[in-house]
Image (cartoon, helix red, strand yellow):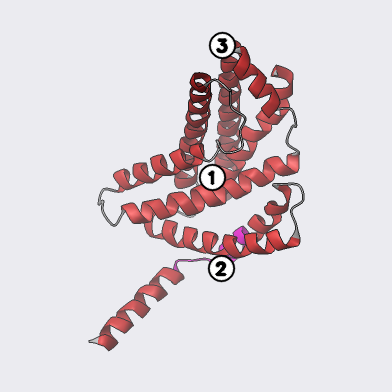
Amino acid sequence: MANVQELTMQHRLVDWVSGLDPVTVGATWVLFLFALPFLEEGFGLETLVVGGLIGLPLVVLGFLAVSRRRAIADRDNARRATLTIMALLTGIGLGAANLAANVGLAAADETIRALLLEHFAEPLSWARVASVAVVEEITSRLFLMSVVAWIAARFLKNARTIFLTALIVSAFLFAVGHLPGRPMPPDSAFAALYASSVVLKSGVAGLVLGWVFWRWGLPYAMVCHFLANGVHKVFELMLF
């Protein structure tokens, strides 16, 4: 009996691993490593090594989980080009909507406007704009959303319900992750309003990016995220 169970486990492991493309996994991990140094100033070799060691299981587990829950059919170059354009337009729309929300918040209260001015005082470099898109899509969509979907599938049977559960949970955690380190108003009521607005805006972005990732694939989610951040970079100084 023990030998049978061991063989069954081995077959399951082989089945899981066979769903991975080593080239895709390796390229994604290298991209993650390349993006890490641009996230923060003073990013040293030790941090890069630790980040790489953490990034590898994130990428592998993410691809393992998503391969069990979602399959994307092969696409020709014309379809890839179409999806790239759609991802670009979606990112532009997402960035414009986020900026419009910020303008509305700034117009509603001077305290929030001052906080937004402080937040945008040091514009992101284009390298950091790109690196944020890469790292956040790998961690929040490829890993987090895929693993949540895999866990949800242990308890749920309907594919749509599994997808929506993973989408909502990952979008919420993505949104909450935008709160640490952000300056808040001293008044608790305004602080709650501002924090809620940050979570709402980031949550909507997480829903859009999660949908793009699940339906189209990781590269298109990165493109969409990059354009959303890029629109911010180009227009935020004009508006604030």
The quarter of the image holding the N terminus is bottom left
Label 2 close to label 1 by CB (< 8 Å):
no
Judged from the image, the secondary structure of the residue bearing numbered disc 1 is helix
Residue on which disc 2 sits = 22
Which of the numbered marks, if any, corresponds to residue 79?
A: 1
The span picked out in magenta is 18-29
Query: What's the residue type where badge 2 is placed?
Result: Pro
| Distance from Cα at disc 1 to Cα at disc 3 | 43 Å
Q: Is residue 212 above or below residue 23?
A: above
How many C-alpha atoms fall within 10 Å of the one at disc 1: few (<14), some, or many (≥20)? few
| Distance from Cα at disc 2 to Cα at disc 1 | 24 Å
Task: Give the residue at x 50% y 41%.
Answer: 174
Judged from the image, the secondary structure of the residue bearing numbered disc 2 is helix
| Distance from Cα at disc 2 to Cα at disc 3 | 51 Å
Query: What's the residue type where badge 3 is placed?
Result: Ala
How many C-alpha atoms fall within 10 Å of the one at disc 2: few (<14), some, or many (≥20)? few
Q: In the image, 149: left or right of 115?
A: left
Residue 17, horizontal then vertical, whole percent: 45, 71
Instruction: Say whether residue 153 is visible.
Output: yes
Residue on which disc 3 sits = 108
Q: Magenta-highlighted stretch: main secondary structure?
A: helix
Task: Give the residue at x 58% y 60%.
Answer: 55
The quarter of the image holding the C terminus is top right
Quadrant of residue 126 in the image? top right
